[in-house]
Image (spheres, rainbow, N blue to C red):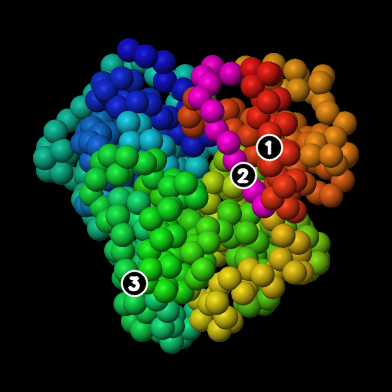
Amino acid sequence: MGEIKFGTDGWRAVIAQDFTFANVARVAQAVADYYKGKEGEKKLVVGYDTRFLSREFAEVVAEVLTANDLPVILSAEDLPTQCISFAIQSEKLAGGVMVSASHNPPKFNGIKIRESFGGSAPPEVTRQIEALLDKREIKRVPLEEAEKKGLLKRKDIIEGYLKKVRSFLDQDLIEKSRLKVIHDPMFGVGDGLIEKILAPSRCQVLTIHPKYNPGFGGLAPEPIEKNLEALKIKVKEEKADLGLATDGDADRAGVVSDKGEYLTPHQVFSLLLLYLVEGRGLRGGVAKTVSLGYQPERIAENFGLSLYEVPVGFKYVCDKMLEKDILLGGEESGGYGYRGHLMERDGILSCLLFVEMLTRLQKPLSRILKEMEARFGASFFKRVDFEKSAVDKEKMIRTLSLSSPSSLGGVPVREVKTLDGIKFVMDDKSWLLIRPSGTEPKVRVYAEAPGEAELKKIMDQGVKMAQEAI
Protein backbone atom coordinates (compact mmCIF):
# COMPACT_ATOMS: atom_id res chain seq x y z
CA MET A 1 0.00 0.00 0.00
CA GLY A 2 3.00 2.29 0.40
CA GLU A 3 4.36 4.30 3.29
CA ILE A 4 2.70 7.64 3.91
CA LYS A 5 4.89 10.28 5.55
CA PHE A 6 4.10 13.96 6.04
CA GLY A 7 6.88 16.38 5.14
CA THR A 8 7.43 20.14 5.29
CA ASP A 9 3.83 20.87 4.23
CA GLY A 10 1.73 17.74 4.13
CA TRP A 11 1.95 14.44 2.28
CA ARG A 12 3.07 14.44 -1.36
CA ALA A 13 3.51 11.51 -3.72
CA VAL A 14 3.45 10.54 -7.40
CA ILE A 15 -0.04 10.16 -8.85
CA ALA A 16 -0.98 6.50 -9.56
CA GLN A 17 2.17 5.28 -7.83
CA ASP A 18 1.55 6.14 -4.18
CA PHE A 19 -0.95 8.97 -4.54
CA THR A 20 -3.95 6.72 -5.28
CA PHE A 21 -7.62 6.87 -4.36
CA ALA A 22 -7.05 4.03 -1.88
CA ASN A 23 -4.20 5.85 -0.12
CA VAL A 24 -6.08 9.16 -0.11
CA ALA A 25 -8.96 7.34 1.62
CA ARG A 26 -6.50 5.96 4.19
CA VAL A 27 -5.23 9.45 4.97
CA ALA A 28 -8.77 10.84 5.10
CA GLN A 29 -9.81 8.17 7.61
CA ALA A 30 -6.81 9.01 9.80
CA VAL A 31 -7.72 12.72 9.58
CA ALA A 32 -11.30 11.85 10.54
CA ASP A 33 -10.12 9.82 13.53
CA TYR A 34 -7.87 12.68 14.64
CA TYR A 35 -10.65 15.29 14.56
CA LYS A 36 -13.23 12.94 16.09
CA GLY A 37 -10.87 12.56 19.05
CA LYS A 38 -10.63 16.30 19.63
CA GLU A 39 -12.90 18.40 21.81
CA GLY A 40 -15.04 21.18 20.40
CA GLU A 41 -15.87 22.09 16.79
CA LYS A 42 -15.85 19.20 14.31
CA LYS A 43 -16.66 20.94 11.02
CA LEU A 44 -13.98 20.88 8.31
CA VAL A 45 -13.41 22.45 4.91
CA VAL A 46 -12.05 20.57 1.89
CA GLY A 47 -10.55 22.20 -1.21
CA TYR A 48 -8.48 21.33 -4.26
CA ASP A 49 -6.29 22.83 -6.99
CA THR A 50 -6.11 22.27 -10.77
CA ARG A 51 -3.84 19.23 -10.71
CA PHE A 52 -4.82 16.00 -12.41
CA LEU A 53 -7.76 14.43 -10.52
CA SER A 54 -7.49 16.89 -7.60
CA ARG A 55 -11.27 17.44 -7.54
CA GLU A 56 -11.94 13.69 -7.53
CA PHE A 57 -9.38 13.12 -4.75
CA ALA A 58 -11.02 15.91 -2.71
CA GLU A 59 -14.39 14.25 -3.16
CA VAL A 60 -12.97 11.01 -1.73
CA VAL A 61 -11.72 12.99 1.29
CA ALA A 62 -15.20 14.49 1.74
CA GLU A 63 -16.85 11.07 1.38
CA VAL A 64 -14.69 9.65 4.18
CA LEU A 65 -15.01 12.62 6.53
CA THR A 66 -18.81 12.80 6.24
CA ALA A 67 -19.11 9.00 6.63
CA ASN A 68 -17.45 9.57 10.01
CA ASP A 69 -20.15 12.13 10.90
CA LEU A 70 -17.85 15.13 10.44
CA PRO A 71 -19.65 18.07 8.74
CA VAL A 72 -17.80 19.27 5.64
CA ILE A 73 -17.76 22.40 3.49
CA LEU A 74 -16.56 21.28 0.04
CA SER A 75 -15.29 24.01 -2.26
CA ALA A 76 -17.47 24.48 -5.32
CA GLU A 77 -14.39 24.99 -7.52
CA ASP A 78 -10.60 24.78 -7.56
CA LEU A 79 -9.06 27.47 -5.38
CA PRO A 80 -5.84 28.75 -3.75
CA THR A 81 -4.65 27.02 -0.60
CA GLN A 82 -5.04 30.23 1.40
CA CYS A 83 -8.79 30.13 0.71
CA ILE A 84 -8.93 27.08 2.99
CA SER A 85 -7.25 29.11 5.72
CA PHE A 86 -9.71 31.94 5.09
CA ALA A 87 -12.70 29.58 5.37
CA ILE A 88 -11.37 28.11 8.62
CA GLN A 89 -11.01 31.56 10.16
CA SER A 90 -14.24 33.06 8.84
CA GLU A 91 -16.41 30.02 9.63
CA LYS A 92 -14.55 29.16 12.87
CA LEU A 93 -13.93 25.59 11.71
CA ALA A 94 -11.94 22.79 13.33
CA GLY A 95 -9.56 22.63 10.38
CA GLY A 96 -9.29 21.82 6.71
CA VAL A 97 -7.84 19.59 4.01
CA MET A 98 -6.39 20.88 0.74
CA VAL A 99 -5.63 18.53 -2.13
CA SER A 100 -2.58 20.08 -3.76
CA ALA A 101 1.11 19.43 -4.37
CA SER A 102 1.72 23.18 -4.55
CA HIS A 103 4.80 23.84 -6.71
CA ASN A 104 5.84 20.21 -7.23
CA PRO A 105 6.21 18.73 -10.74
CA PRO A 106 2.99 17.68 -12.57
CA LYS A 107 3.27 13.97 -11.67
CA PHE A 108 2.83 14.77 -7.96
CA ASN A 109 -0.26 15.45 -5.91
CA GLY A 110 -0.62 15.94 -2.19
CA ILE A 111 -2.69 16.61 0.90
CA LYS A 112 -2.18 19.61 3.16
CA ILE A 113 -3.73 19.77 6.62
CA ARG A 114 -4.75 23.12 8.11
CA GLU A 115 -5.54 23.55 11.79
CA SER A 116 -8.18 25.70 13.55
CA PHE A 117 -5.97 28.82 13.55
CA GLY A 118 -5.85 28.67 9.74
CA GLY A 119 -2.23 27.62 9.34
CA SER A 120 -0.34 24.43 8.55
CA ALA A 121 -0.81 21.58 11.00
CA PRO A 122 2.33 21.44 13.17
CA PRO A 123 4.54 18.31 13.18
CA GLU A 124 2.97 17.00 16.40
CA VAL A 125 -0.43 16.94 14.65
CA THR A 126 0.78 15.26 11.45
CA ARG A 127 2.61 12.68 13.59
CA GLN A 128 -0.69 11.89 15.33
CA ILE A 129 -2.44 11.54 11.97
CA GLU A 130 0.32 9.24 10.70
CA ALA A 131 -0.05 7.13 13.85
CA LEU A 132 -3.78 6.73 13.15
CA LEU A 133 -3.27 5.35 9.64
CA ASP A 134 -5.00 1.96 9.19
CA LYS A 135 -6.13 1.87 12.83
CA ARG A 136 -9.80 1.81 11.81
CA GLU A 137 -11.73 0.53 8.83
CA ILE A 138 -12.28 3.17 6.17
CA LYS A 139 -15.82 4.52 6.03
CA ARG A 140 -17.21 6.19 2.90
CA VAL A 141 -20.59 7.56 1.93
CA PRO A 142 -21.70 8.95 -1.46
CA LEU A 143 -21.66 12.74 -1.50
CA GLU A 144 -25.34 12.89 -2.49
CA GLU A 145 -26.23 10.93 0.64
CA ALA A 146 -23.99 13.16 2.79
CA GLU A 147 -25.75 16.23 1.35
CA LYS A 148 -29.18 14.76 2.15
CA LYS A 149 -28.06 14.15 5.72
CA GLY A 150 -26.90 17.76 6.00
CA LEU A 151 -23.28 16.71 6.52
CA LEU A 152 -21.98 18.19 3.24
CA LYS A 153 -22.36 21.68 1.84
CA ARG A 154 -20.79 22.84 -1.42
CA LYS A 155 -19.79 26.48 -1.18
CA ASP A 156 -18.11 29.29 -3.13
CA ILE A 157 -15.18 30.25 -0.91
CA ILE A 158 -13.24 32.41 -3.37
CA GLU A 159 -15.45 35.51 -3.29
CA GLY A 160 -15.20 35.82 0.49
CA TYR A 161 -11.45 35.37 0.27
CA LEU A 162 -11.13 38.10 -2.38
CA LYS A 163 -13.08 40.44 -0.13
CA LYS A 164 -10.54 39.69 2.60
CA VAL A 165 -7.67 40.52 0.24
CA ARG A 166 -9.33 43.80 -0.79
CA SER A 167 -9.67 44.77 2.88
CA PHE A 168 -5.89 44.52 3.33
CA LEU A 169 -5.09 46.66 0.31
CA ASP A 170 -5.34 50.46 0.03
CA GLN A 171 -8.39 50.55 -2.22
CA ASP A 172 -7.97 54.24 -3.08
CA LEU A 173 -4.49 53.52 -4.42
CA ILE A 174 -5.64 50.40 -6.25
CA GLU A 175 -8.44 52.33 -7.96
CA LYS A 176 -5.99 55.06 -9.01
CA SER A 177 -3.50 52.55 -10.39
CA ARG A 178 -2.98 52.52 -14.16
CA LEU A 179 -0.18 50.00 -14.56
CA LYS A 180 0.31 47.48 -17.31
CA VAL A 181 0.65 44.10 -15.61
CA ILE A 182 1.45 40.65 -16.99
CA HIS A 183 0.22 37.77 -14.83
CA ASP A 184 1.47 34.20 -15.17
CA PRO A 185 -0.69 31.87 -13.02
CA MET A 186 1.44 28.97 -14.30
CA PHE A 187 -1.70 27.08 -15.39
CA GLY A 188 -2.87 27.09 -11.76
CA VAL A 189 -5.69 28.36 -9.60
CA GLY A 190 -4.49 31.99 -9.52
CA ASP A 191 -5.87 32.55 -13.02
CA GLY A 192 -8.25 35.50 -13.09
CA LEU A 193 -8.00 36.44 -9.41
CA ILE A 194 -5.55 39.35 -9.77
CA GLU A 195 -7.72 40.67 -12.60
CA LYS A 196 -10.79 40.54 -10.35
CA ILE A 197 -9.12 42.60 -7.63
CA LEU A 198 -7.82 45.14 -10.15
CA ALA A 199 -11.13 45.40 -12.03
CA PRO A 200 -12.04 48.81 -10.42
CA SER A 201 -8.62 50.20 -11.38
CA ARG A 202 -7.33 51.47 -14.70
CA CYS A 203 -4.72 48.72 -14.84
CA GLN A 204 -4.35 46.61 -17.95
CA VAL A 205 -3.80 42.97 -16.99
CA LEU A 206 -2.60 40.46 -19.58
CA THR A 207 -2.53 36.76 -18.68
CA ILE A 208 -0.22 34.06 -19.99
CA HIS A 209 -0.53 30.34 -19.19
CA PRO A 210 -4.14 30.32 -17.96
CA LYS A 211 -5.62 27.18 -16.44
CA TYR A 212 -6.40 24.33 -17.17
CA ASN A 213 -3.34 22.24 -18.04
CA PRO A 214 -2.62 19.30 -15.71
CA GLY A 215 0.82 18.98 -17.28
CA PHE A 216 1.60 22.62 -16.37
CA GLY A 217 3.17 23.17 -19.78
CA GLY A 218 5.91 20.66 -19.00
CA LEU A 219 7.26 22.72 -16.08
CA ALA A 220 6.83 22.50 -12.34
CA PRO A 221 4.44 25.35 -11.40
CA GLU A 222 7.05 26.99 -9.19
CA PRO A 223 7.72 30.74 -9.70
CA ILE A 224 11.50 30.51 -9.91
CA GLU A 225 13.52 32.17 -12.67
CA LYS A 226 14.02 29.15 -14.95
CA ASN A 227 10.22 28.68 -15.08
CA LEU A 228 9.43 32.34 -15.76
CA GLU A 229 11.33 32.95 -18.98
CA ALA A 230 8.06 33.48 -20.90
CA LEU A 231 6.94 36.07 -18.32
CA LYS A 232 10.26 37.95 -18.59
CA ILE A 233 9.95 38.03 -22.39
CA LYS A 234 6.30 39.13 -22.30
CA VAL A 235 7.03 42.00 -19.90
CA LYS A 236 9.67 43.34 -22.31
CA GLU A 237 7.55 42.75 -25.42
CA GLU A 238 4.56 44.56 -23.94
CA LYS A 239 6.67 47.24 -22.22
CA ALA A 240 4.78 46.36 -19.05
CA ASP A 241 5.34 47.93 -15.64
CA LEU A 242 5.28 44.65 -13.76
CA GLY A 243 5.32 40.89 -14.21
CA LEU A 244 3.62 38.74 -11.57
CA ALA A 245 3.52 34.97 -11.18
CA THR A 246 1.67 32.66 -8.83
CA ASP A 247 2.45 28.98 -8.29
CA GLY A 248 0.11 26.04 -8.82
CA ASP A 249 -1.99 26.71 -5.72
CA ALA A 250 -1.33 30.48 -5.72
CA ASP A 251 0.12 30.76 -2.23
CA ARG A 252 3.55 31.76 -3.59
CA ALA A 253 4.55 34.73 -5.71
CA GLY A 254 7.19 35.56 -8.30
CA VAL A 255 7.99 39.08 -9.53
CA VAL A 256 9.58 40.47 -12.71
CA SER A 257 10.59 44.13 -12.99
CA ASP A 258 9.75 46.61 -15.76
CA LYS A 259 13.10 45.71 -17.34
CA GLY A 260 12.14 42.05 -17.60
CA GLU A 261 14.46 41.07 -14.76
CA TYR A 262 13.50 38.32 -12.33
CA LEU A 263 13.57 39.37 -8.68
CA THR A 264 14.81 36.74 -6.27
CA PRO A 265 12.62 35.90 -3.25
CA HIS A 266 15.23 37.69 -1.11
CA GLN A 267 14.67 40.89 -3.07
CA VAL A 268 10.89 40.43 -3.09
CA PHE A 269 10.71 39.86 0.67
CA SER A 270 13.00 42.83 1.35
CA LEU A 271 10.97 45.14 -0.92
CA LEU A 272 7.73 44.06 0.77
CA LEU A 273 9.22 44.63 4.22
CA LEU A 274 10.60 48.05 3.32
CA TYR A 275 7.30 49.05 1.74
CA LEU A 276 5.23 48.01 4.77
CA VAL A 277 7.58 49.88 7.10
CA GLU A 278 8.21 53.05 5.06
CA GLY A 279 5.30 53.17 2.60
CA ARG A 280 2.63 52.19 5.10
CA GLY A 281 4.35 53.25 8.31
CA LEU A 282 3.85 49.88 10.01
CA ARG A 283 6.00 48.29 12.71
CA GLY A 284 6.36 44.76 14.04
CA GLY A 285 8.60 41.72 14.05
CA VAL A 286 10.04 39.93 11.03
CA ALA A 287 10.10 36.13 10.71
CA LYS A 288 12.15 34.53 7.96
CA THR A 289 13.28 31.03 7.19
CA VAL A 290 16.98 30.16 7.38
CA SER A 291 17.05 30.12 3.55
CA LEU A 292 16.22 33.85 3.26
CA GLY A 293 18.98 36.42 3.07
CA TYR A 294 20.70 39.34 4.70
CA GLN A 295 18.77 42.31 3.26
CA PRO A 296 15.76 41.85 5.59
CA GLU A 297 18.17 41.54 8.53
CA ARG A 298 19.68 44.93 7.63
CA ILE A 299 16.25 46.52 7.14
CA ALA A 300 15.03 45.14 10.47
CA GLU A 301 18.15 46.43 12.22
CA ASN A 302 17.79 49.87 10.59
CA PHE A 303 14.21 50.27 11.82
CA GLY A 304 14.66 48.58 15.19
CA LEU A 305 12.49 45.58 14.32
CA SER A 306 12.83 42.20 16.02
CA LEU A 307 13.97 39.50 13.60
CA TYR A 308 13.46 35.77 14.04
CA GLU A 309 15.04 32.99 11.94
CA VAL A 310 13.17 29.67 11.69
CA PRO A 311 13.58 26.33 9.85
CA VAL A 312 12.38 26.01 6.24
CA GLY A 313 8.61 25.62 5.95
CA PHE A 314 5.92 28.23 6.38
CA LYS A 315 4.48 26.33 9.34
CA TYR A 316 7.52 27.51 11.34
CA VAL A 317 6.89 31.09 10.23
CA CYS A 318 3.27 30.62 11.26
CA ASP A 319 4.34 29.35 14.68
CA LYS A 320 6.28 32.57 15.17
CA MET A 321 3.32 34.64 13.96
CA LEU A 322 1.14 32.96 16.59
CA GLU A 323 3.74 33.57 19.28
CA LYS A 324 4.98 37.10 18.47
CA ASP A 325 3.75 40.33 16.90
CA ILE A 326 5.04 39.55 13.40
CA LEU A 327 4.44 42.15 10.71
CA LEU A 328 5.79 40.03 7.85
CA GLY A 329 6.85 36.42 7.60
CA GLY A 330 8.45 34.74 4.62
CA GLU A 331 10.39 31.91 3.07
CA GLU A 332 12.78 31.54 0.15
CA SER A 333 10.23 29.64 -1.94
CA GLY A 334 8.18 32.82 -2.48
CA GLY A 335 5.63 32.46 0.32
CA TYR A 336 4.88 35.56 2.40
CA GLY A 337 2.35 36.10 5.20
CA TYR A 338 1.04 39.31 6.76
CA ARG A 339 -0.17 40.44 10.17
CA GLY A 340 -3.91 41.08 10.14
CA HIS A 341 -4.56 38.89 7.11
CA LEU A 342 -4.26 35.08 7.36
CA MET A 343 -1.98 32.66 9.19
CA GLU A 344 -0.87 31.53 5.77
CA ARG A 345 1.27 32.65 2.85
CA ASP A 346 -0.70 34.42 0.14
CA GLY A 347 0.65 34.76 -3.38
CA ILE A 348 -2.32 36.80 -4.63
CA LEU A 349 -1.98 39.45 -1.92
CA SER A 350 1.81 39.54 -2.30
CA CYS A 351 1.46 40.26 -6.02
CA LEU A 352 -1.13 42.97 -5.45
CA LEU A 353 1.03 44.70 -2.85
CA PHE A 354 3.53 45.33 -5.64
CA VAL A 355 0.78 47.05 -7.63
CA GLU A 356 0.00 49.17 -4.57
CA MET A 357 3.72 49.85 -4.00
CA LEU A 358 4.37 51.08 -7.53
CA THR A 359 1.25 53.25 -7.47
CA ARG A 360 2.13 54.85 -4.13
CA LEU A 361 5.80 55.43 -4.88
CA GLN A 362 5.26 56.47 -8.51
CA LYS A 363 8.54 54.87 -9.54
CA PRO A 364 9.37 51.90 -11.78
CA LEU A 365 10.15 48.72 -9.88
CA SER A 366 13.70 48.58 -11.27
CA ARG A 367 14.40 51.98 -9.67
CA ILE A 368 12.78 51.03 -6.35
CA LEU A 369 15.00 47.93 -6.23
CA LYS A 370 18.12 49.92 -7.09
CA GLU A 371 17.39 52.46 -4.35
CA MET A 372 16.85 49.68 -1.79
CA GLU A 373 20.14 48.01 -2.75
CA ALA A 374 21.97 51.32 -2.45
CA ARG A 375 20.80 51.47 1.17
CA PHE A 376 20.96 47.82 2.23
CA GLY A 377 23.39 46.15 -0.15
CA ALA A 378 22.96 44.15 -3.33
CA SER A 379 21.82 40.53 -3.20
CA PHE A 380 22.75 37.84 -5.71
CA PHE A 381 21.14 34.47 -5.02
CA LYS A 382 21.12 31.00 -6.53
CA ARG A 383 19.61 27.66 -5.61
CA VAL A 384 20.72 24.34 -7.10
CA ASP A 385 18.62 21.19 -6.61
CA PHE A 386 19.72 17.67 -7.40
CA GLU A 387 17.81 14.40 -7.17
CA LYS A 388 18.60 12.35 -4.08
CA SER A 389 16.13 10.34 -2.04
CA ALA A 390 16.35 8.97 1.50
CA VAL A 391 19.05 11.37 2.67
CA ASP A 392 20.01 10.97 6.33
CA LYS A 393 19.81 14.63 7.32
CA GLU A 394 21.56 14.29 10.66
CA LYS A 395 24.39 12.25 9.16
CA MET A 396 24.80 14.81 6.38
CA ILE A 397 25.04 17.65 8.92
CA ARG A 398 27.62 15.74 10.97
CA THR A 399 29.72 15.01 7.87
CA LEU A 400 29.67 18.64 6.74
CA SER A 401 30.35 19.89 10.26
CA LEU A 402 33.43 17.71 10.62
CA SER A 403 34.84 19.00 7.33
CA SER A 404 33.64 22.58 7.82
CA PRO A 405 35.60 24.95 5.55
CA SER A 406 37.45 27.92 7.04
CA SER A 407 36.39 30.06 4.08
CA LEU A 408 33.96 30.01 1.15
CA GLY A 409 34.41 32.08 -2.00
CA GLY A 410 37.63 33.39 -0.47
CA VAL A 411 35.76 34.92 2.51
CA PRO A 412 36.32 33.57 6.06
CA VAL A 413 33.43 31.59 7.57
CA ARG A 414 32.25 33.40 10.69
CA GLU A 415 29.40 31.18 11.88
CA VAL A 416 27.92 27.72 11.28
CA LYS A 417 24.19 27.17 11.93
CA THR A 418 22.34 23.86 12.04
CA LEU A 419 18.78 25.13 12.47
CA ASP A 420 17.72 23.31 9.30
CA GLY A 421 20.45 21.55 7.33
CA ILE A 422 23.78 23.36 7.68
CA LYS A 423 24.37 27.04 6.96
CA PHE A 424 27.78 28.70 6.68
CA VAL A 425 27.75 32.48 7.22
CA MET A 426 30.79 34.44 6.05
CA ASP A 427 32.34 37.67 7.35
CA ASP A 428 30.65 39.77 4.64
CA LYS A 429 27.21 38.19 5.42
CA SER A 430 27.29 36.02 2.29
CA TRP A 431 26.17 32.48 3.10
CA LEU A 432 25.75 28.89 1.93
CA LEU A 433 22.99 26.50 3.01
CA ILE A 434 22.80 22.76 2.29
CA ARG A 435 19.67 20.80 3.22
CA PRO A 436 17.47 17.94 1.97
CA SER A 437 14.06 19.07 0.70
CA GLY A 438 11.08 18.35 2.92
CA THR A 439 8.69 18.08 -0.03
CA GLU A 440 10.65 16.33 -2.80
CA PRO A 441 13.41 13.67 -3.09
CA LYS A 442 16.06 16.35 -3.59
CA VAL A 443 18.98 18.03 -1.88
CA ARG A 444 18.99 21.81 -2.15
CA VAL A 445 22.05 24.05 -2.12
CA TYR A 446 21.43 27.78 -1.57
CA ALA A 447 23.84 30.70 -1.63
CA GLU A 448 23.67 34.49 -1.45
CA ALA A 449 26.50 36.98 -2.00
CA PRO A 450 26.96 40.69 -2.74
CA GLY A 451 28.30 39.98 -6.26
CA GLU A 452 27.84 37.46 -9.06
CA ALA A 453 31.49 36.34 -9.11
CA GLU A 454 31.47 35.68 -5.36
CA LEU A 455 28.16 33.84 -5.68
CA LYS A 456 29.52 31.49 -8.34
CA LYS A 457 32.57 30.62 -6.24
CA ILE A 458 30.45 29.87 -3.17
CA MET A 459 27.90 27.84 -5.12
CA ASP A 460 30.56 25.77 -6.91
CA GLN A 461 32.12 24.87 -3.54
CA GLY A 462 28.71 24.23 -1.99
CA VAL A 463 27.51 21.81 -4.67
CA LYS A 464 30.75 19.85 -4.41
CA MET A 465 30.49 19.72 -0.61
CA ALA A 466 26.86 18.54 -0.78
CA GLN A 467 27.60 15.79 -3.31
CA GLU A 468 30.50 14.49 -1.23
CA ALA A 469 28.47 14.47 2.00
CA ILE A 470 25.54 12.32 0.87
Decide: is 26 above or below 82.
above
The segment highlighted magenta reads 380-391
| Structural distance between the alpha carbons of marks 3 and 1 | 37 Å
Image coords of residue 24 (percent x, y): 30, 27
Residue pictured at 48% horizontal, 83% vertical: 173
| Structural distance between the alpha carbons of marks 2 and 3 | 30 Å
Residue 400 appears anywhere in the view: yes
For mark 2, what is the residue?
Answer: 382
Choose between 239 and 21: the one closer to the eye: 239
Decide: is 152 above or below 63.
below
Amino acid type assigned to the residue bearing label 1 in the image = Met
Residue pictured at 58% horizontal, 28% vertical: 443
Q: Residues within 10 Å of mark 1 (few under 14, many from 20)?
A: many
Choose between 380 and 183: the one closer to the eye: 380
For mark 1, what is the residue?
Answer: 459
Residues at marks 3 and 1 touching, judged by CB atoms closer than 8 Å: no
For mark 3, what is the residue?
Answer: 205
Please give the count of numbered marks on the rendered protein.
3
Q: Which mark is residue 42?
A: none
Decide: is 63 above or below 238.
above
Image coords of residue 47 (percent x, y): 31, 45
Question: Which secondary structure, mark 2?
Answer: strand
Question: Which secondary structure, mark 3?
Answer: strand
Between marks 2 and 3 in the image, the one whose residue lies nearer the viewer:
2
In the rendered image, residue 386 lying in the magenta stretch gets the answer: yes
Mark before the other along the chain sequence, 2 or 1:
2
Residues at marks 2 and 1 touching, judged by CB atoms closer than 8 Å: yes
Question: Which secondary structure, mark 1?
Answer: helix
Q: Characterize the magenta stretch by its predominant secondary structure.
A: strand
